[in-house]
Image (spheres, rainbow, N blue to C red):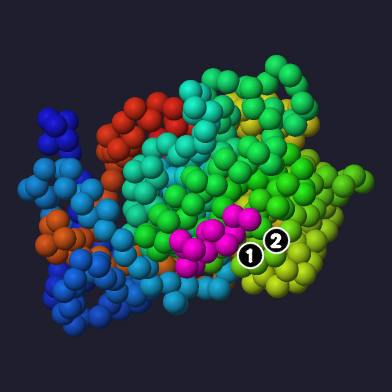
Amino acid sequence: MQLWKSYRPVIAVLLLLGVCLSSACGTGEAETTTPATTEPTLPTTTETTTTPATTPPPTTTEEPEDESALWWEDFKQPFTLDSSAYPEFYRGAWGARLDELRSYLLNAAKLREDGVDTIMMEAEIVLDPETHEPKSIGDDIFIFYLQALKREGFRIILIPNAMHPNLAQGLEYDWENSSDPDKDYYPSYELIRKFDGVVLKWAAIAEEYDVEAFLPMLEPYKLAGDYQMASQWLQEILPQIREVYSGQVWATEIMHDIGHGLSIPRPLNYSGYNFLVSGPPAGWKEANYWEDMIEFFIQKGLEYTDNYSMQGFGLYEYGGYTGGIWYEDVQMAAIGQNLTQEQAANIAEAFIRQASGKIKASFPRMSVGWVDFDTPSYEIITAWYKSMGDNIFPPVIYSWTYGHYIVYRWTYEQLIEIEQKLGGDDYEIIFNLDSPH
């Protein structure tokens, strides 16, 4: 408790008179939208309300007198983010790990300034080493980041994620589907059906916290073991999801190598899903060959959306890999795909040439090794984002804890402390890299 008494997040207090101070609203060079000056109406129920997210909130700063743990009461209150003025295109970033979500929150203002308006984020799933049943870990941590990123103005796409090296929790998973008798777990229809309960649990959380879209599982093929079983599971889980979640239900799968330097999104049965996102091969040193591949990849994805009457097609985890992540260094080195920053920039340019006007969502990992901050590929992708529409602003949210309108600001150390407190015994087993920026 003493540790938490010392925590003092910097809070931007939104005055009821709507006076916009220059320290919070910027110099006027980048954000020119004028906020309303009428007095906001206080909510009369326990449902938190917001103003349109396209209006920058007027702010001053205030040090809270309460003990720090009170902010969690605010963050457990669901609210609806008004994204009606956002572009139709999802200008996104993919939060595949806890440290990436932390980095996105710490850099929220930069991401907004650079055109990002959507975060696709994980909820982490593992296999319990004692019961051998799937379970989610660190639930409150991921709910915290879901809410914190929404409070920064980002639409949230939520997806349970079992595709981490820690899936088997010290046991062995047959990632290559090799029927190795020494492995403890094997992809199968029986295995993926075990994930139904945890998927529906997070679908209900997606409904409660009003996320933009929900995906049942990252890379279901890796759990089912073949196309027919993965397709069957996607069709069986969909009506169950729709019973507890009223928003858009998206599907996702990674690439399937068809030879001759070409790949396609895995050809599963996507009937009934609203949208498809797929992960293509990472960038090659020969950007021209990769561009030929991504052109064909996008073409096939668009064929799927037409065949299954989906609203659109998008790509996630694309780009050139430049190194720095231990488990991906090994994978990429094995196939000769560790690129220089210049080569990664060539991949980003090739991607935009082929994707512009065709896809409707983009979710690169804006983190170490991929489309990292302040790299040439980041500048290329975000310039493309900014060409599509205006920047977003955080919504104005009433705090039931503090009794006024506030925006929270965090430090790296505070977020680590929050994760440790909310994660409890789960914290040490969540897949997480040290990423202080």
Q: Residue at x 11, y 62 (%)?
A: 403
Where is mark 2, residue-wise?
270
Residue 45: give x, y in percent of width and height: 19, 71
Residue 256: give x, y in percent of width and height: 79, 47
Q: Answer with the quarter of the image where residue 298 lies.
A: bottom right
Camera sees residue 141? yes
Q: The N terminus is located in which quarter?
A: top left
Q: Answer with the quarter of the image where residue 249 lies.
A: bottom right
Name the magenta segment's main secondary structure: helix
**Tag 1–tag 2 contact (CB < 8 Å):** yes
Where is mark 1, residue-wise?
273
Q: CA–CA distance between discs 1 and 2?
A: 6 Å
Above or below: residue 236 compared with residue 395: above
Is 190 displayed left or right of 115 in the figure? right
Is 78 displayed left or right of 291 in the figure? left
Q: For the residue marked with disc 2, what is the amino acid? A: Tyr
Q: Is residue 384 magenta?
A: no
Q: For the residue marked with disc 1, what is the amino acid? A: Tyr
Q: The C terminus is located in which quarter?
A: top left
Is 194 displayed left or right of 354 in the figure? left
Q: Residue at x 52, y 64 (%)?
A: 242
Q: Is residue 239 magenta?
A: yes
Magenta stretch in the rendered image: 236-247
Residue 139: give x, y in percent of width and height: 38, 42
Circle 2 SS class: loop
Most extreme residue toward the bottom is 38
